Amino acid sequence: MAAPTPPTPAVAAAHAAVENRSGVRSSIASGEADMLLRAPIHVRRAALKTLDTHDLGYILTEVERETGSLYGLWADTPSGFIEDVLGESIWSKQRAIVDAVPRYKRTMVPAGFGVGKTYIAARLCAWAAATNPVGTMLVVTTATRFRQVRNQLWPHIRKIVSRASLPGFCDEVQWKMPDQWGNNVLVAYGFTAQAHDEASMQGIHGNPKLLIIVDEAGGIARTIGAGTNNLLTGDARLLAIGNPPADDPRSWFEVTCEEGDDPEEPGTVTIPIATFDSPAITNERVPNCLDCPPSVAPHSLALHLPDQDWIDRTLREYGEDHPYVIAKVYARFPKGGGGKVIPVTWVEDAKQNEDPTGPGWVRPCDLGLEGETAKHTVKRGSWVRLGVDVAADGGDEFTIYRIVGDAIEHRHHSSGAANDNQVKVAKRILEEIHAAERLAQALGSTAKVHVKVDKNGLGHGAVGMLEVWGENGKHNSEIIGVMVSESPERDDPGAVMRPFRKRDEMWLATRALLQPDPATGSGRLRLRVDREAAIQLTTPNLGHNSGGHAVVESKKQMKARGMKSPDRAEGILLAVYEPFARRRGLIA
């Protein structure tokens, strides 16, 4: 087991100060404390480094008498608190962000991928709660979903409190400290407001000071954003940090970030932090990481940040103009929502949708079936369906995806010689049919497995072979050949989006299932798929023809702008797709 991280001199001095409380007040320490509190920040921090733990302990005792907090010397310097008290390393952009909070009413931070958004938000929470007298400051943290609050931000906060031996104790999403009478007072907590319930942001401001930390701010609804603005009265501050939304034009986050560039809004500052700002790319000199356990070899903080290789790979996979790149690499707001058939955030949300548990839910890997390794849960009795996109003439990729109820998973992909004839392709599909039938039987499903196969190219021959094998008793599934170039099965002239071809219909149907419900914030699917499939789902652009029909960008058009054929995505579409007569009751 790794040895515990030793306390910083400031924390050790704070512990000594607690012991000094009952001692004789030192006039020298009182004078030095008063001088330090009045000194400029850089002078104060330099002076503190010259003191030993014993002398600093006496000074902190006097600081507590004057400010009400042992850490009052750092009340105006969050970066100083993070470095001197927590003993952690931050870099220039992070330092600019945290030190802006005491000076501005709103600090808005559109941020790229992997630049330490949640890390820095947690440290700011610790600073605000620890440097103010108990009962005078309340820190409220929120995000688009409670699991983000519980599983991302608050584990950081709990770790900080424990490792730095800060006062009080943390539970799952609360931090309490004892006041001077020994009462446990709530100093910070996390919650999530319902997207359309502006009243959920009311009643928070009961302390002289308030800090609201909005993590994953790009997903915050306009009503909730407006609710935070209503709380910013008196000595209240807001930090909103997150990726710019790739598909929500004129979001609350975007509009408020624009205020930072408006001279008529002096209370708002916007500090973008793009992935290109990472010290791993700029070569900014940064200290060694102090957040890893002592057993880990010393290494630069830059090792944990995105590098040029990540950016180059992301540009290749998505394309320079993709909303994901604009938002997560450049930390800018895509204009017009990106024009994609399926927005990036919908796919990301579907990948993060939690697995239901309880009676009736089971993991395929626990059923004892050959080849079943999936650890997500599925509902007993659910329909089992396969989607197969066959590589045209052996090119591109041959992919198979499976949906059980609402959960979609990757089952197979191959390219080249593995797909060079219809017999090989049909045999591989048959293997997946047998696995799907075993799973359906184990789940107690009464419906046949539906196998939807793209009939273009080799797929036509594969469909024929599978149908014959079914007649000969080699499987008991229903084979459905799909011609994506045909007209859509149904055409509603009054629909907002009228598909032009069946391929468009399939994309729009999957879009509808992934679209978050305003009441729950979640779509109707759980995506347990590979990274490449998730990228492909968000790649095609959406357009309209002269007849007003919705048209999904063709494979040829996508390849012309350097994108891969979306074979994996279309395997998912086929898994989801059902002819109208078979559609009822398929999604659990």
Image: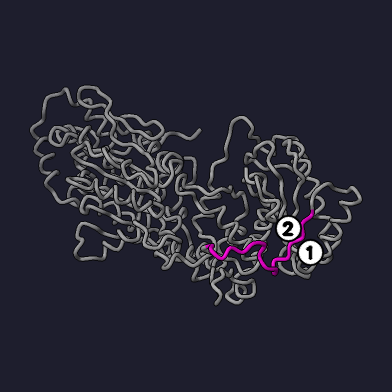
- The answer to whether any part of residue 79 appears in the image is no
Q: Secondary structure at mark 1?
A: helix
Q: Is residue 480 magenta?
A: yes
Residue 329: x %, y % from top left: 45, 63
Q: Secondary structure at mark 2?
A: strand
Vertical arrangement, residue 358 with respect to residue 478, above or below = above
Q: Main secondary structure of the magenta part?
A: loop
Is residue 548 left or right of 235 when viewed as pictured? right
Q: Which mark is residue 388?
A: 2
Circles 2 and 1: CB distance less than 8 Å? yes
Q: Residue 7 or 100: which is nearer the viewer?
A: 100
The image quadrant that residue 355 belongs to is top right
Residue 402: x %, y % from top left: 69, 50
Is residue 486 left or right of 77 when viewed as pictured? right
Three-letter amino acid code at disc 2?
Val
User: What residue range appears in magenta?
Assistant: 479-495
Q: Is residue 559 magenta?
A: no
How far apart are the alpha carbons under marks 2 and 1? Answer: 9 Å
Q: Residue 184 or 379: which is nearer the viewer?
A: 379
* Location of mark 1 (residue): 459
The image quadrant that residue 452 belongs to is bottom right
Vertical arrangement, residue 54 with respect to residue 274, above or below = above
